[in-house]
Image (spheres, rainbow, N blue to C red):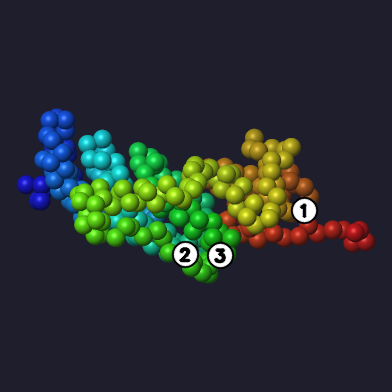
Amino acid sequence: CLERWDPRDRSALEMLRPWQRVFDPGNWEPLMEKVLMRLERVVANLDVRPDGQDIEPIKDLLAWNGIAPADALARVLDIALFPQWHKALREWLRTPGCDFAEVLQWYQGWKALLQALKDQGPIQRQMAHGLELMKHFMAKGAEAVVEEEPPSPTAPDAEQSTGLPRHRAMSAEAGAEASRVAMEEVSLSLSDYLAQVSGEEGLLFRPKKAFHLGKQVYQFGSASIYVEKNLVYVAPKSGGQDAGEWRLVSMDELLRLGREAEKKPPGKR
């Protein structure tokens, strides 16, 4: 009956939970394989979009954590979710006037959603690649050329070489690959993100001995900024940071302002 089971129906989860320690692996693993195949099919049909995202299929999958192997669940996401996740991210980043603060907020939402699987190699690889993609577009703009492709799932013939069920075999190989690559722990606030990008762009980013509306003021290259709710506000260019209106800027505009050379008064060197 699991072949026709709808993952939105949590009754199967509750029905199988008590038998987890009763069945021997020879009987339990085929059951889990059927569950994983159904979950994969539903997640693969999920439309990844920045607005109005339906996350219920992901929640249905995560509900099996602790019953199905965590590495196998991560593998389902690696195969079924992340190819379209990266596609949606690239399309959004290429949109003229893209607000990188909104993209970062979207990214953090997905990271929080997948928190239970954050230690799994496929999740770490895919999220780290998404972060690098964001940083690349922030530095280069909407016309950025991306040469590196997203991490690819392991080839589907892993079962023949290991004898393990398909999802578990591929997860083991993916985990081995992840252990060979030093993965950064993706735990970003917007200020963390600005610090990383400024370092890569050779711009100074540091807190100043000043506050505006109770918010810490930072130097970002030649601009003075403060951050509020994943939004960046920049100080007026003339008359000091307390004169004039601070204005909301997009990330690409912030980079342009930060790169502007400090204008020196005439006659001074």
> Do callouts 3 and 1 mark residues in contact (Cβ within 8 Å)?
no
Q: Return the residue at label 1.
A: 238
Percent across and percent down for residue 246 are: 66, 49
User: What residue lies at 21% left-to-right and 49% top-to-bottom?
Assistant: 164
Q: Residue furthest right?
A: 267
Assess disc 3: are there few (<14), some (14-19) or many (≥20) residues with their C-alpha within 10 Å of its C-alpha. many
Can you tell which mark lies on residue 141?
A: 3
Query: Could you give the CA–CA distance between mark 2 and mark 1, rounded to whole angstroms?
Result: 42 Å
Mark 3 or 2, nearer chain start = 3
Mark 3 or 1, nearer chain start = 3
Mark 2 or 1, nearer chain start = 2
Of residues 210 and 172, which is closer to you in this image?
A: 172
> Do callouts 2 and 1 mark residues in contact (Cβ within 8 Å)?
no
| SS at mark 3 in the image | loop
Q: Residue type at mark 3?
A: Gly
The answer to which image quadrant residue 66 occupies is: top left
Query: Could you give the CA–CA distance between mark 3 and mark 2, rounded to whole angstroms?
Result: 16 Å
Of residues 218 and 201, which is closer to you in this image?
A: 201
Q: Residue type at mark 2?
A: Glu
Percent across and percent down for residue 222 are: 73, 54
Percent across and percent down for residue 234 are: 66, 50
Left or right side of 206 for 138 = left
| SS at mark 2 in the image | loop
Left or right side of 205 for 57 = left
